[in-house]
Image: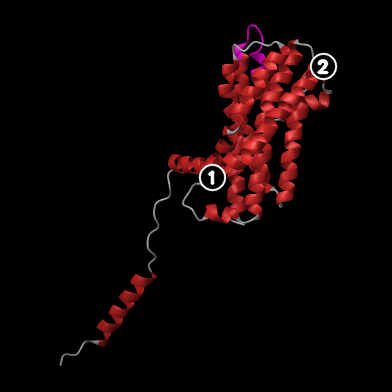
Amino acid sequence: MSAVPLETVIRAEDDRAAAVDVAAPLGPRARMLPALAAVYRAQLSRARVARIPLLFVATFQSVGIMILMRGVVDGGGEARAVVAGSSVLVVAFVALNLLAQYFGQLRGDGGLDHYATLPVPPAAVVLGAAAAYASFTVPGTIVTAVVGCGLFGLPLTHLWVLAAVIPLAGAALAGLGAALGLLAPRPELATLLGQMGMSAALLLGVLPAERMPGLLQYARDLLPSTYGVEALARTFSGDPDWGVVLLDLGVCAAVGVVSLTVATWAYRRAAVR
């Protein structure tokens, strides 16, 4: 009968205990673009049924505003401002108001905990949700712009610029809406902030700037959607100044990057609390 040294037995036990204590390596985090596409598809399918009726409400609201303003504004620069502002208002209703409500509810009912357990970059969650909500604004914005051009006798020649206005204004407003929803301490407050933001877009975006008091004109310059409105309104003239249009779109894009960055920071902050 052979004897095993006590030191050998103890060393073997320690090796087995160390092997148990070592955690299995985690899988790699999802890459940004595939994660963004997955979140976008999930949000799009989730919100399709619930948000389409609200999209009709946003479109009818904007068309109704233009019909009311038709009795006050005859044409010229004021008509261009009304049509452009009403078109971008559809984006504000969905991308700002509804997204603030969504992230406020997500934070209130613990839905952020689900996303926090997934190996998905925080930016993909914010950008995917923002892109999905902004996608719902495309039909309503186009319909509003076409109807507005018919009401005020504006040309349809350069409406293709909506292909740039919608995503850029949508990114700026969606980032702002997501940040409001994530930073609000309660879902009710997130809803209130989203509605106040949409009201600001209505007041400062649809009304012609020339008829506003000086203080409101300064506030208008701080609204992210203002530069999308200005870019679209300039294209309704007979000979648009494309340099200024590109400048407005560039400012709108820069504001969108900043607002989405703030929304991503707000998501990280809310997910770890």
Image quadrant for the N terminus? bottom left
> How packed is label 2: few (under 14 Cα within 10 Å), some, or many (20 or more)?
few
Residue 25, placed above or below residue 252: below
Where residue 116 sits: x, y (%)? 53, 54
Residue nearest the viewer, comparing 213 with 237: 237
The part of the image, by quadrant, that contains residue 20 is bottom left
Disc number placed over residue 173 in the picture, else none: none
- Would you say residue 235 sits in the magenta stretch? yes
Residue type at mark 1 is Val
Q: Which residue in the structure is indicated by mark 1?
A: 125
* Residue visible at 67% across and 44% down in the picture: 101
User: Regarding mark 1 in the picture, which secondary structure is present there?
Assistant: helix
* Residue visible at 65% across and 20% down in the picture: 145
Is residue 182 in view from this perspective?
Answer: no
Disc 2 + disc 1, Cβ < 8 Å: no
Residue 201, placed above or below residue 82: below
| Distance CA(mark 2)–CA(mark 1) | 44 Å
* Residue visible at 65% across and 31% down in the picture: 91
Disc number placed over residue 71 in the picture, else none: 2
User: Regarding mark 2 in the picture, which secondary structure is present there?
Assistant: loop
Residue at the far left: name it.
Answer: 1
- Would you say residue 231 sits in the magenta stretch? no
Q: How is the image coloured?
A: secondary structure
Residue at the far bottom: name it.
Answer: 1
Range covered by the magenta-colored residues: 232-243
Residue type at mark 2 is Gly
- Residue 195 horizontal side relative to residue 6, left or right: right
Residue nearest the viewer, comparing 119 with 54: 54
* Residue visible at 71% across and 30% down in the picture: 223
Image quadrant for the C terminus? bottom right
Lower position in the chain sequence, tag 2 or tag 1: 2
